[in-house]
Amino acid sequence: MAQSQVSAKKQQELQQQYTTYKNNLQQLAERIGNVEQETEEHKLVLETLTPLPGDRKCFRMINGVLVERTVKDVLPALQTNSDGLKKVLDELVKQYKRQQEDMEKWKVRPSCALILQPAMLCCVILWQ
C-alpha cells in the first residue's frame, strides 16, 4: 500500500512536470503569434509609407496618443521597431525549440511514458 501511494505521488509529480512543459510551450506559442502579428503590421505600414514623399503628413500612435508627423520622421523609427521585433521573434522561436527539445528528452526518460486517455488526453505512468 505504501508503494502504491509513492507511485501515485510520483505519477502526480510527473503529470505536473508534463503539464508545466505543455503550458510553457503554449505561452511561448502565443507570444510568438503576437510578435508575428506586430511584425506583419509593421511590414505593411513600411510598404505603404516607403513610396510616399518624405514631406507627406502621416499619423503615428505613441503611448496611446495620435501624433502628426511626416513620413521622413516616421520611417526610421518604424524600421527600427520592425528590426527589433524580428530579433525578438527569432529569440522566441529559439526558446520554443529549446523548450520542445527539453520536453522530448524528458518524455523519453526510462521512468515515464505517455499514454492517451479520452478524459485527460495525456497521463503519465511509471514503468516498474
Image (cartoon, rainbow, N blue to C red):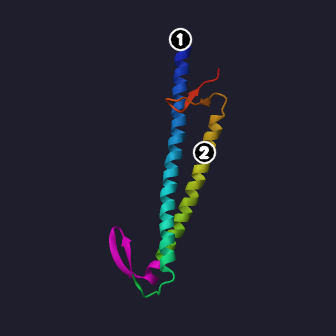
Q: How many marks?
A: 2
Q: Mark 1 Cα within 10 Å, few/some/many (few <14, many 20+)?
A: few
Residue at which label 2 appears: 100
Q: Mark 2 Cα within 10 Å, few/some/many (few <14, many 20+)?
A: some
Disc 1 or disc 2, which is closer to the eye?
2
Residue at which label 1 appears: 1
Where does the image place residue 39, in percent across and percent down from the top left?
A: 51, 65
The earlier-in-sequence mark between 1 and 2 is: 1
What is the distance, in whole Å, between disc 1 and disc 2 at their CAs? 36 Å
- The C terminus lies in which quarter of the figure? top right
Q: Residue at x 37, y 71 (%)?
A: 61
Asked where in the image residue 123 lies, by quadrant, the reply is top right
Q: Residue at x 49, y 52 (%)?
A: 30
Q: Given the image, on which type of amino acid does mark 1 rest?
A: Met
Image position of 55 with respect to 108: above or below: below
Where does the image place residue 108, in percent across and percent down from the top left?
A: 66, 34
Judge whether residue 72 is colored magenta.
Answer: yes
Camera-side residue of 30 and 7: 30
Q: Which residues are magenta?
A: 58-75
Q: Given the image, on which type of amino acid does mark 2 rest?
A: Gln
Where does the image place residue 72, in percent across and percent down from the top left?
A: 46, 83
**Magenta region's main secondary structure?**
strand
Where does the image place residue 106, in percent across and percent down from the top left?
A: 62, 36
Tag 2 secondary structure: helix
